[in-house]
Amino acid sequence: MLHYRSDIDGLRALAVIAVVAYHAGIPGFSGGFVGVDVFFVISGYLISGLLLNEMEATGKVDLLAFYARRIRRILPMLLLVVATTLLLALLLFPDDQKRIGRSVTSVFFFFSNHYILNKAGDYFEPGTDLVPFLHTWSLAVEEQFYFVWPLLFLVFARFHTGAVRKITLICAVALLSLLSLLGSIWLTETNMPRAFYLMPTRAWEFGFGALALCYVRYGQALPEKLAGTLALVGLLGIAFAVGSYHESMLFPGIAALLPVIATVLLLLAGTYQNGWVTRLLSSSPATAIGLLSYSWYLWHWPLMSLVRIYDLGQRDMLRDSLLALLALGLAWLTFDTVENRFRRAQGWFTTNRSTVLTGLFLSVLIVLGGALVVKWSGYQDHHIGGVYLARKDIPPLRYACHFRPWTMVDEQKLQDQPPCTLGEGKLEVVLWGDSHADHLMPLLMVANQMDALHVLQRSQGACPPLLGAAPYSNGRLNTGCADFNKKMSALTLLNAQQGAKGVILAGRWLSYVPDTRQSVRSSGEVSRILVADGEQANTDPQWVLQVFEQALQRTVDTLVAQQLRIIVMAPIPQMPFSAPTCLMRRSASDCGVPSAQFMQQKQAVMAVLSRVAGRHPSWVKVVDLSEALCSDWICPAFKEGHVLYSDDNHLTATASRSLYPVLRNELSWLAGRS
C-alpha cells in the first residue's frame, strides 16, 4: 500500500519555494526553475503508486475513476485562478485582453505548453514575463503524461500476472524513461525550447519517480546509514541545482539529471523516517507549505505577471517577493474553501461520471468566457485609438517578403520576387537584412512612388546581413540565417550583373553585438551573440565585436567587388518596453530613452560601421536615422502626433514613411543617379 508520507509534502515545499523565489528574482535561486522537475518526479512516484495499488488490488485500472480524481485535484483551483486573472485583465488591461483571453482554451484543454512554445517561445526569454498563464505549461505536460500513463498499467493488468507482471512493468518503465531521456538530451542540444516544453522529453522525469516507487514497493529496505547518506546527497543535489543553475545553460537534457536523481534519492531515503533530513522535511512548517504548494504555484505567477504587464515588463525583486507572500496568503485562504473541499466527492463531484461531465462543462464555460474577453477586446480596438493600433501599423509587405526567423528558406521562394519588387524596368536597389530591413520598406515604397525607385526586398527575422557569421542563442546556432545570407549574396550578385546599382544592409545590430563596456546581456535576458563559421561560441564582448566587424567587412567587400554601392543602416533607438503599451499607461514624456544613453549603447557598433565604411569611402555610406528620431536629450516613442514604434524596436509604417526625406539624397546616390 502507498501510505501518506509527510516528507513528500516537505519535498513539495522545497520545490514550490524554489520556483516562486526564482520567479521573484531572489538571489541564490537562479536555478529555481528545477522545482518543476522535482514536482514531476514526485508526481510520477505518487500517481504510479495509486495505479499500482489499484492494479494489484482489483486486477484492473478504472480510467474513469482515475480521470475523475485528476479533475477533483486539478480543476477547481485552476478555474478560480484563471477566472480571477481574466477578470483583472478585463478591468486593467484593455490593450492586452485579446492576448490573455486567447490563451484560456489552451489552459483548460491542457495544451498550453504547445501554445506557449508557439506564441512566446523560449521559457527564459524576458517576454514570457508578460504571459499570465505561463506556469500552466507544467500542468499541461503532467496531464498529457497522464492521458497515456494509465494505459500502460491497464495493459499489464490485463495481460500479465504475478512476478511476470512486476518484472515486465519495471522493464517497460525503465525502457520508456531511457528513450525519453535520450530524446531530451538530443533535443536540448538541437532545439532547447521544444525539449523544455514538450511532454515526450519530460516523461522520463515522471518515469524516474515511478521507478523509485517500484524500488520502495518491491526492493529491500535501505539500511539506516545508507538512507541518511542518500537523503543528505539528495538535499545537497537539489540545493546545488537551485543555487547554481541559470537561464543561459542548456536545459533540461543532461542538466536535469541532477535535480531528478536528487529527488529520487530523497524519495528512497524518506522510507526511513528517523533520518534528520526526513524529519526536517516532515516538520510542521515544511508540510504546511507543501500542502499549499499547488495553490501557491497557481496564484503566484498570474499576480507577478499582471503587475509586470502594468509596469511595462519591469522586474522588481522586493515588489515580486511581496506578491509571492500575497499569493501564499491566497493559497491559504483557498486551500480549505476550494482545493481541499472539492477533492472530496460531493455535490456535482459525487460520482466519477458526474465529476468528468462537470469538469468538461466548467472548462467549456471558462473557455467561452475567454472568447468573450477576446470579442470584447475586438470591440474596444475600434475605440481605444491610434496609440493602441500602432501595434498593427506594420510594413504592408511583411507577410509576403519577410521570411520567418530560424527557418531554412527555399531558394525558389527567394527568387520569386513579385510582389517584393517595386517599380518598372531594371532593378536598382536591393534591401537585405533582418526585421530592421523590413521596417524600412514603407520608406522605400514612398521612394518608389515619388522617385520611381526600383527596389527588391529580401529579409529574414533574427538574421543580420552578414557573410561568415550567424546568430547564436541558448546553445543553438541559427543555421537558417547562414543559409539565407549565402543565398542572398548569390542573388544580389546576380542582380548586379543584371544592372542593379546598390544594396541597403540593415540589421538590429545592437541585439547581436554587446556594448564592450557591458556584459553580453543583463541578468534578465537570454544572451544572443554572433559566431563565426566553424568556430565555437565565445561570449567575450570584444571577441563578438571582432566577429561582427570581420563578417560585415566580408559582406561589404563581396558587394563592392561587383561595383555595388552600399548603405549600411546605423542602429535606431530601442525602447526598454513596448512603445504602444507604454503610451497606453504612461504619459509620452515617460516613454522614451535618454539620447545620451542610446549614444553610449551604440558607440561600439558605430565604431565598427565607420571603420568598415572607411575602407571603401567611394562605395559605402553609413546612414543614421536616429538624428531624425531623437532630440538632444530624448529619443521619444511619440513624436509629432505619431507613435514611432510598433513594439520596443521596430518602426511603425507611419514613422518609416515619414523618414523618406531624410534618406532621399542617399537613395539617389545608391541608385547611381547622382
Image: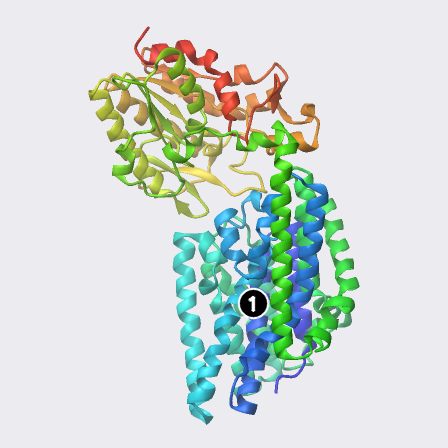
Q: Is residue 172 above or below residue 139?
A: below
Image coords of residue 463 (percent x, y): 39, 35
Please tell me which residue is depicted at 31% across the width and 32% down the height of the picture. 467
The one of 623 and 456 positioned closer to us in this rendering? 456
Q: Is residue 143 above or below residue 498?
A: below
* Residue 345 lies in quadrant: bottom right
Disc 1 marks which amino acid?
Phe
Image coords of residue 436 (percent x, y): 45, 28
Q: Is residue 69 left or right of residue 433?
A: right
Q: Specify whether residue 360 is in view.
A: yes
Within-10-Å neighbours for mark 1: few <14, some 14–19, many 20+: many
Q: Is residue 249 above or below residue 218?
A: above
User: Mark 1: which secondary structure?
Assistant: helix
Q: Specify whether residue 228 is in view.
A: no
Please tell me which residue is depicted at 54% across the width and 45% down the height of the picture. 125
Identify the residue at the far left of this view: 497
Please tell me which residue is depicted at 23% across the width and 17% down the height of the picture. 499
Q: Quadrant of the C terminus?
A: top left
The one of 638 and 14 positioned closer to us in this rendering? 638
Identify the residue at the far top of this view: 674
The one of 150 and 15 positioned closer to us in this rendering? 150
The one of 641 and 619 positioned closer to us in this rendering? 641
Image coords of residue 582 (percent x, y): 65, 32
Residue at numbered disc 1:
40
Total labels: the figure holds: 1
